[in-house]
Amino acid sequence: MAEATNVNRAAVSTPAENPMKRLLRATELDTRLLGMIGAMLIIWIGFDIFTGGLFLTPRNLWNLSVQTASVAVMATGMVLVIVTRNIDLSVGSILGFVGMIMGVLQAEILPQILGFEHPLIWVIALAAGLLLGAAIGALHGSIIAFLNVPSFIVTLGGLLVWRGATWFVTSGRTVAPMDATFRLMGGGTNGSIGATWSWIVGLLACAAIVAIILNSRRQRYRFGFPLRPVWAEVFLSGVGCAIVLVAVWVVNSYPWPINIARNYAEANGIAWPEGGLFIAHGIAVPVLVALAVGIVMTFISTRLRFGRYVFAIGGNPEAAELAGIKTRWVTVKIFALMGALCAIAAAISTARLNAATNAQGELDELYTIAAAVIGGTSLAGGTGTIAGAMLGALVMQSLQSGMVLLGIDTPFQRIVVGIVLVVAVWLDTIYRGRSR
Amino acid sequence: MSDKHTPLVEMRNISISFGGIHAVDNASVDLHAGEVVALLGHNGAGKSTLIKILSGAYRRDAGEILINGQAADINNPRDAKQYGIETIYQTLAVADNVDAAANLYLGRELRTPWGTLDDVAMEAKAREVMGRLNPNFRRFKEPVKALSGGQRQSVAIARAILFDARILIMDEPTAALGPQETAQVGELITQLKREGIGIFLISHDIHDVFDLADRVFVMKNGKVVGHARTEDVTKDEVLGMIILGKVPPGAVPGPGAMQEA
């Protein structure tokens, strides 16, 4: 709603110029990102119509957010990998192996030492997983950087090695259950922060959006750079806050299942009301984790020297080397970071499943790469954004969830996802060709 | 005059080969402070390779490098920069997808006390340096790939002088430029020379550099044909050195000089 009224206002104030063009120019928004959001909305609305209103429900959107989290986390790292003209085919297998190790640690080894459900179990398991993931990534990166083996081959080897290793840990046995605190990372009824905290997070996000826009305006003013018109700043803040608040409202509209709510009411001595007790889920913990990862990775890629080097190497590896950048070390660090992100994704997916299996994360490498590429990361290197990749992950997951709701068979789902990937990249090629 | 002092740079008996081909064979060159030395020769004569050894891009097989008379250990571009050696490459080694300020400080970024990139300070300094070099330059926010050849060259030169270089290496500095920009580079070289910087100019076209240089070294087939002060030889004589390896009376012959039959 807010968007429509603002667009109209822009149109009224300048009858001469195309209002959409004027809006885009004044707000300096990335048209590519907007195109992706538009495509996603079309997918959402399309599925909603075909499923008879099943898609755009708080329940489905909440599930969608949780299902996206794991791949979205890995996609942020894949952006840096692809930007430097590398590829990582091993992320799904690393996820499986690290998840299995974390599972065995918390379900079989640590309880014997610390006792069942000891509060430190999840901390140790997660820390061990992060270290292991980073170590595996660093190993891959070192082979790529110092032994000059192409990343495609190293990580193709990694795909086989770590998948095999996953099986080897327990001889193929599934490990369950996970530690209760660890399970919160997977979402679910308990793994969500509830209505009040969701609103607090939402309001903080709104404050941050406004603060960032104000700060950027102050910086531009201080150094005499051209400013955006005030109406454009207000529009951006308004749309940003509206999106955040609508998202919070949606996740707060999804109540706990009736049996869980009833048990909760009984346990806390609350009288069961006539129309049922409405307890909202709120934002799921894995979604918060993914958002935090997105923010941190954006910070790393745009504000830190490391991120600057990643993009410089992607643009011209020779120039970066001649400028004195230790390009090999940067490669090692990128893959180590990718490994650590796989560990976070592994924590989310094992916690969600409440088990570690030897098939966990299979094909995730392809979804992760697809998410990054659909999100605007160029395989030629040098360009890509974290936000785009996360949005790409959401688009992929939307397609899959929608097809599940429509009752489309798994083989056909894969056919559709594959075709969509190719078409999306083709459209992107056309877009880039035009903007040049 | 130049022979009385210790040279700023002396490369002695440098050799390097790639897969059995002697790209540079027993070559010796020297450069004094405030002097412009042109390194001439055909494409493939070994001049770029020789100079890439000085800038740390290649590692020599034999020979030694002296900076101010002291043996210098140069194994990579970072080592070279420590000795105050800055290089502007023929291929304009700039990172295409980041902006001018990011390129100027690539590898030596300014950072805030929190360890984040201080883009504002870098851009302010970039505007100052670029203002001195190329006052018409305005496109600070765009990736370098959107710039013209001359603008990219300004960025590359600005990067080299930003960090108080003592030794500047320019590989075909005017190859990508129009006449006006070439004249600008010429003025810049004169100015840097007055500041006491030693400059190596590398070119395959004698007309580009003859008037700017104090001395010329000519290379052919990886060997130094000879060197001369530009006031002692004519352009035609130097051309004879480049094409035939024939050393005129005003020049000092090197190991690559044509042997009189």
Image (cartoon, helix red, strand yellow):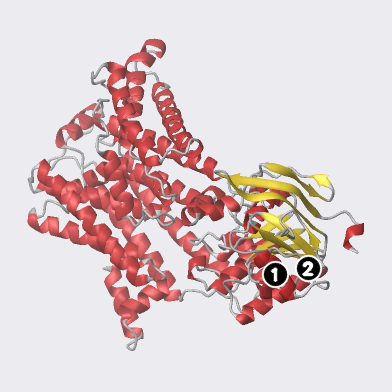
Q: Residue A432 appears at what percent x and percent y?
A: 34, 66
Residue A260, compared with residue A5, is above or below; it is above
At a point 56% along the width and 67% down the height, the residue shown is A218
**Depth order, front residue of A54/B200:** B200
Give the chain of mark 1: B
Q: Residue A106 appears at what percent x and percent y?
A: 35, 20
- Quarter that holds the N terminus of chain A: bottom left
Q: Amino acid at mark 1?
A: Gly
Q: Residue A434 appears at what percent x and percent y?
A: 33, 71
Residue B247: which quarter of the image? bottom right
At a point 50% along the width and 65% down the height, the residue shown is A214
Q: Secondary structure at mark 2?
A: loop
Distance in Å between CA atoms under marks 2 and 1: 8 Å
Q: Residue A217 appears at what percent x and percent y?
A: 52, 68
Local crowd size for mark 1, using a 10 Å CA cut-off: few (<14), some (14–19), many (≥20) = some
Q: Amino acid at mark 2?
A: Pro
**Depth order, front residue of B15/B237:** B237
In the picture of the structure, the residue carrying the numbered disc 2 is B248
In the picture of the structure, the residue carrying the numbered disc 1 is B240
At a point 47% along the width and 74% down the height, the residue shown is A228
Q: Secondary structure at mark 1?
A: helix
Q: Disc count in the image? A: 2
Q: Is residue B125 visible?
A: no
| Callout 2–callout 1 Cβ contact below 8 Å | yes
Give the chain of mark 2: B
